[in-house]
Image (cartoon, helix red, strand yellow):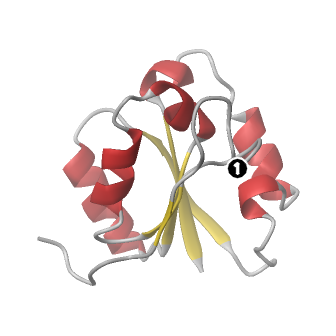
Amino acid sequence: MKIAIIAREKTMERCTAKGCFRAFNNREDSFCDYGEDVELASFMNDGGEFDHKIQKLIDLGVDTVHISTCIRGKNENYEEMAEQLSEYFNIVGYTHGSVEGKARRAVFLDKKSGSWK
C-alpha cells in the first residue's frame, strides 16, 4: 500500500515535519493501523499546481492520502480539499495528535471513483 501526506504550504516555511514523520515511523496516531508493508510514497504541500500533484499521486499508485494536522487546524477549506481528493484516494484527515483536534474532528472518506477527470 502506498500513502501520501499533504502538509500546509505556509506551515512548511517553518516546520520540519517532525510530527508527521514521528507518527508515521512509530505507527502512531493516524498511522496506528498500518503494518510494515506501507510505503510513504510522497510528502508534499498544498500549494502550487494542485491538479498536477493529484495526477502525480495517481501515477505513483497512491491509495490513501493523509491531510496533515496543520491543514485541518488552519485551512478553512479543509473539508472541501478532503472531498476533492476523495475522488481518487481514501482520505485520512490528520497525521498526528487527536482525532478530535483542537478546532474540528478529522474527516475520513473512502475513494469515490477510480479515474482521473
In the image, 76 versus 33, the foreground residue is: 76
Name the side, left or right, on which 36 lies relative to 57: right
In the rendered image, the residue lying farthest to the top is 14
All told, the count of numbered labels is: 1
Q: As drawn, which residue projects farthest toward the right? A: 26
Of 93 and 100, nearer the camera is 100
Would residue 10 be found to the left or right of residue 47 on screen?
right
Q: Give percent across and percent down for residue 114.
A: 27, 84
Q: Quadrant of the N terminus?
A: bottom right
10 Å neighbourhood of mark 1: few (<14), some, or many (≥20)?
some
Q: Give amino acid for label 1.
A: Val
Residue at the image position 35 percent from the left and 66 percent from the top: 86
Residue 61, horizontal then vertical, whole percent: 42, 77
Whether residue 66 is situated above or below residue 48 in the rendered picture: below
The quarter of the picture where residue 58 lies is bottom left
- For mark 1, give the secondary structure: loop
Quadrant hosting residue 18: top right
Of the pair 81 and 52, the residue shown nearer to us: 81
Horizontal side, residue 88 vs residue 23: left or right = left
Compared with residue 75, is residue 91 higher up or lower down, i.e. above or below? below
Q: If the image is split into quadrants, where does the C terminus sit?
A: bottom left
Q: Identify which residue is drawn at 38% across, 76% down.
A: 111
Label 1: which residue? 99
Residue 13 placed where, x, y %? 53, 17
